[in-house]
Amino acid sequence: MTPQSDEDEVWRQIVASFNDTAERDSADQPWPDSENVPVEPTRRVVKPPEVDELDDVVEPDRDEDDDEGHYTPPAPPPLPKVDLTTKIAWVALFGGPAYLLVAAMANWEMQGWALFAAVAAFIGGFVALVVRMGDGPPNDSGWDDGAVL
């Protein structure tokens, strides 16, 4: 018998037993007690807030248990300080095309020097940001440069 005929026979057996039921019911298998779900799920009753005579909402007393499971993320770190050159480069990068867009939408008559200045601002801002980007690690990375290959 060849290996191919053995595989064909196994495949025929798999196809023939496709609709057969399992010999052992999965309910008979052991189940850890820690995985059991209570028969009736616990229900929380939420009381509506009390309203006084002036129609002001009064907060109900909160227990320590009410906050259980509630995640409050820590405050984000402050944004890094940006130097003046980088700010000017960003303004030039977006300001040049913004001026051209507003001038075109408002149907303003654009002078040649204004067009040149807007395009030059865009190109200059882009070049300034790329040149200042650098390709090395930050200066404050410490002694460990990570995995260097």
Image: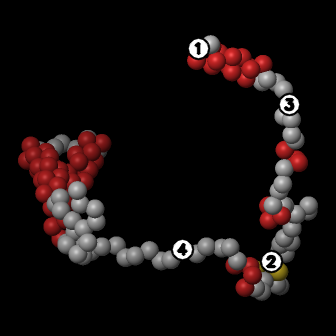
For discs 4 and 3, the disc positioned in front in the rendered view: 3
Disc 3 marks which residue?
21
Disc 1 marks which residue?
2
- Choose between 138 and 146: the one closer to the eye: 146
Residue at 59 percent across and 14 percent down: it is 2
Q: In terms of sequence position, does the residue under pointer 2 or pointer 3 come before the other?
A: 3
Query: Which numbered tag is attached to residue 92?
Result: none
Residue 6, quarter of the rendered image = top right
Residue 56 percent location from the top left of the image: 75, 81
Horizontal side of 74 relative to 78 (left or right) equals: right
Query: Which numbered tag is attached to residue 49?
Result: 2
For discs 2 and 4, the disc positioned in front in the rendered view: 4
For discs 2 and 1, the disc positioned in front in the rendered view: 1
Report helix, strand or loop for mark 2: loop
Residue 53 drawn above or below residue 108: below
Report helix, strand or loop for mark 1: loop
